[in-house]
Image (cartoon, rainbow, N blue to C red):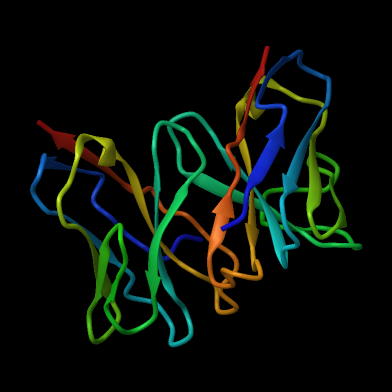
Amino acid sequence: SAVISQKPSRDICQRGTSLTIQCQVDSQVTMMFWYRQQPGQSLTLIATANQGSEATYESGFVIDKFPISRPNLTFSTLTVSNMSPEDSSIYLCSVYGTASSYNEQFFGPGTRLTVL
Amino acid sequence: DAKTTQPTSMDCAEGRAANLPCNHSTISGNEYVYWYRQIHSQGPQYIIHGLKNNETNEMASLIITEDRKSSTLILPHATLRDTAVYYCIVSSENFNKFYFGSGTKLNVKP
């Protein structure tokens, strides 16, 4: 399996500000993804983080609001820009395609964001 | 969009088998069925996955019907620690994108 860490684990932010969330994996992976989980809801895929190129966003999510970087095969960031209370959620990164578990997707512990 | 439907919640007595159903009637030939669970807002935990054949590992068994339109996750001896939301997911055709449905909240009771 892959060991995934996210920073910060939680944060409380003021509306109008931005927060960058980091995702670090302990081994090279093929794919990295970002999800959002609003309170009491299921997970929603935000985007696929592509190494060395622009992320691929799902319907309803745009780059200006959720810029994503993936500079190498083990690291990615998600920025939540110009935050509003509706952005209060848990943000999770996941990885797919490790050397030992090619068909499994592993999830990080999540970042709990509260926007006031 | 999610391609699965699951009951909202289920109860199970501790020590008994928990059988969690999932419908995925629009699944295509190359798509896998995955099961994950999420305990108390932690990151989802992988349980098992399969394509056509039934699968078993140390955590659970996965029974997929012959027409692949539904499946059942079986936890053979449920414990209180198995209380969680269980998600049945059909992967995309290149089996890397997951679209989560609403999941089943399994309550294991003493």
Q: Choose between A26 and B26: the one closer to the eye.
A: A26
Is residue A101 positioned above or below B43 on the image? Answer: below
Residue drawn at 85 percent across, 62 percent down: A51
For the image, the number of numbered tags is 0
Percent of width and height locating residue B105: 28, 41
Image position of B80 (left or right of B37): left
Q: Quadrant of residue B55?
A: bottom left
Task: Name the foreground residue: A61 vs B21.
Answer: B21
Image quarter where the C terminus of chain A lies is top right
Rendered image quadrant of residue B21: bottom left
Q: Tell me: A38 left or right of A23.
A: left
Give the position of the N terminus of chain A as an image quadrant.
Answer: bottom right
Q: Is residue B46 above or below residue A103?
A: above
Q: Quadrant of residue A22?
A: top right
Residue A10 position, x and y percent, is 65, 22
Task: Tell which of B7 and B58 is nearer to you.
Answer: B58
From the top left corner, tell me how far across and down residue A111 is, in percent: 64, 31
Q: Is residue A41 left or right of residue A87?
A: left
Picture residue at 32% right of the left edge, 75% below the top: B25
Q: Position of residue A113 (x, y in %)?
A: 65, 24
